Amino acid sequence: MGAPSDGRAYRGWADRLAERVACVQGGLLYANLAVRGRTARQVHDEQLPAALALRPDLVTLACGTNDLLRRRFDPARYAADVEAIQRPLVDGGATLLTFTLPDLGPVLPLARPLGARLRAMNDALREATARCGGVLVDVAAYPVASDPRLWSDDRLHANAAGHARIAEALAHALRLPDADALWQQPLAAGPPAGSAARLAAEVRWWRVHLLPWLWRHSRGRSSGDGRGPKRPHLAPVAVRAGADGTCDGASA
């Protein structure tokens, strides 16, 4: 979501990380079971069995935004759901990698009342990951993650630059060659947007994103209804040499 690249299909942080790993080790079998709109409980019920069947060596897990936006949020239940996802994967020998969700206030002002809920969700994720022995990247600890310039127009998903930062953070956590902590650094200051531009952006966001979202949820529907994962089976990630002679990955 939010990261079309080079005229290809959406290429998010998981695709980018898979390409990075494939470059390092000369190849990779990669599946992506994610489906938009899913809560942690749905990830557990719908995606965990398939993930376990793949017998993975490395698993990335990102869930919580959809739990956060529900009418009611129970941190204890969320923690239990996340632990129920992580534990069998880690016990099966996989390295499990996950990350916290940054403050949404600077990106989505309407989400500011959810601040306490977000902090509780992140604490639950930290604790569950520590209990299970997973690897957690605490993205929420770095203000740059809340820079609106790293978020897409819908303000709920990263844009291409944001996905690149997430992939770099995860690569750094995995200690991949040439990965570093530069993803934590703030963006250079840019010119402030004028009031007319800000107003136009708000009107467009309400019309294109918020009102359709409210309409769907008022009918108990999700943008992920009827959708399946884009890579439900393990498939190779192609590795080729770039123009400068360095490795360049492309999902096969």
Image (spheres, grey):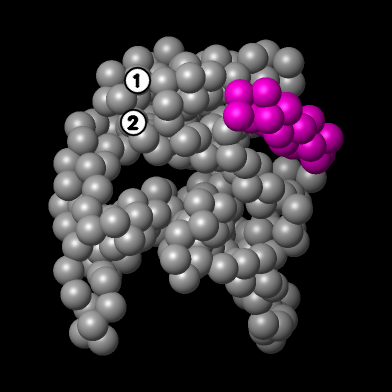
Residue 56 is tagged as 2
Chain part drawn in magenta: 113-133
**Viewer-closest of 24 and 81:** 24
Lateral position of residue 127 relative to residue 205, left or right: right
Residue 139 in sight: yes
Q: Main secondary structure of the magenta part?
A: helix
Q: Whole-percent x and y of residue 169?
A: 55, 58
**Neighbour tally class for label 1: few under 14, some 14-19, many 20 plus, Cα within 10 Å:** some
Q: Residue at x 22, y 53 (%)?
A: 27
Residue 21 is tagged as none
Q: Whole-percent x and y of residue 121?
A: 72, 31
* Amino acid carrying mark 1 in the image: Leu
- Which quadrant of the view contains residue 83? top right
Whether residue 120 is in magenta: the answer is yes
Q: Residue at x 66, y 66 (%)?
A: 184
Element on which disc 1 rests = helix
Element on which disc 2 rests = loop
* Amino acid carrying mark 2 in the image: Pro
Residue 52 is tagged as 1
